[in-house]
Amino acid sequence: MILTSHADLAMENGQTGVWLSTFADAYYAFIQAGFEVTVASPRGGQSPIDPLSEENAHITEGIKTYREDFMAKMDFGNTWSLEEVGSLAYDAIYIADGHGGLWDMAANAKLGQLLYSGLLNNTPVAMVGHGVAALFSLAKLRPAVLQGMHVTAFTDTEEALLKRHAYLPFSLKDRLKELGAQFTHAIIPFTPHVETDGIFITGQNPASAVMTAQALVERMEVEQLYCG
């Protein structure tokens, strides 16, 4: 699991970070499936949490469980750096949501190398919301990777409804389309939507995190059954 390390929005007193439910909900889906989870981030150590994601309106069962789970808090608070895990092999990769990903995942050489290795080894990669920005790091190594790919991510409408659109470095949708992706989204903002194309599973927003994690678990179970 990869989390953003970036906390600052381009606005006075603006703070972002990991959208907590997209970590917690997926984390428990993976633990319940019997997976061993490694949590990493660009810088390592404690990842910031977007304060908005801890407001009552956004609390999920995963967050409630996380708040009472010492080991999960240890994983979140002591992430490995991408430098430390970049040379290791993993059976799957999951990238959580968080506006910070627009800054530290969109042009991260180590992350690009990790995803490129996944592409070469047919390793499934799941991304949620702003975590989809990681594809831009991969595109620096494989420019045509997004051509024709069916993908979803946080939309401009959702950014506007959160009133953060004016402070972001770029539009996810626009950049994905510029690189040739076939961008899709739910008709109603903030409702679940997931796309699968090859090894890539993308979820539109935090509401899509459970579906995205489940799709990754199902993909892994099928591969384990086939390999067995």
Image (cartoon, rainbow, N blue to C red):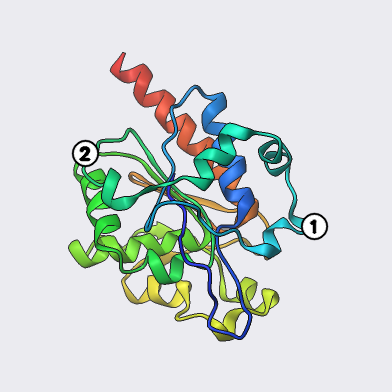
Task: Residue at 30% x, 39% y: name it.
Answer: 123
Q: For mark 2, does the 10 Å Cα neighbourhood hold few (<14), some (14 to 19), or many (20 or more) residues? A: few
Q: Is residue 115 at least partly visible in the picture? A: yes
Residue placed furthest toward the top: 228
Q: Earlier in the sequence, mark 1 or mark 2?
A: 1
Q: Secondary structure at mark 2?
A: loop
Q: Nearer the viewer, residue 51 or 132?
A: 51
Q: Name the residue type under label 2.
A: Asn
Establish if 6 lies above or below 215. below
Residue 217 shown left or right of residue 165 in the figure: left
Q: Quadrant of the C terminus?
A: top left
Cα separation, mark 1 vs mark 2, equals 40 Å
Q: Quadrant of the N terminus?
A: top left
Residue 103 drawn at (x, y percent): 42, 71
Label 1 or label 2, whichever lies nearer to me, is 1
Image mark for residue 24 = none
Establish if 24 lies above or below 185. above
Q: Which residue is mark 1?
A: 57
Task: Residue at 27% x, 51% y: name it.
Answer: 83
Q: Which residue is mark 2?
A: 121
Q: For mark 1, does the 10 Å Cα neighbourhood hold few (<14), some (14 to 19), or many (20 or more) residues? A: few
Residue 22 shown left or right of residue 101 in the figure: right
Task: Residue at 25% x, 64% y: name it.
Answer: 139
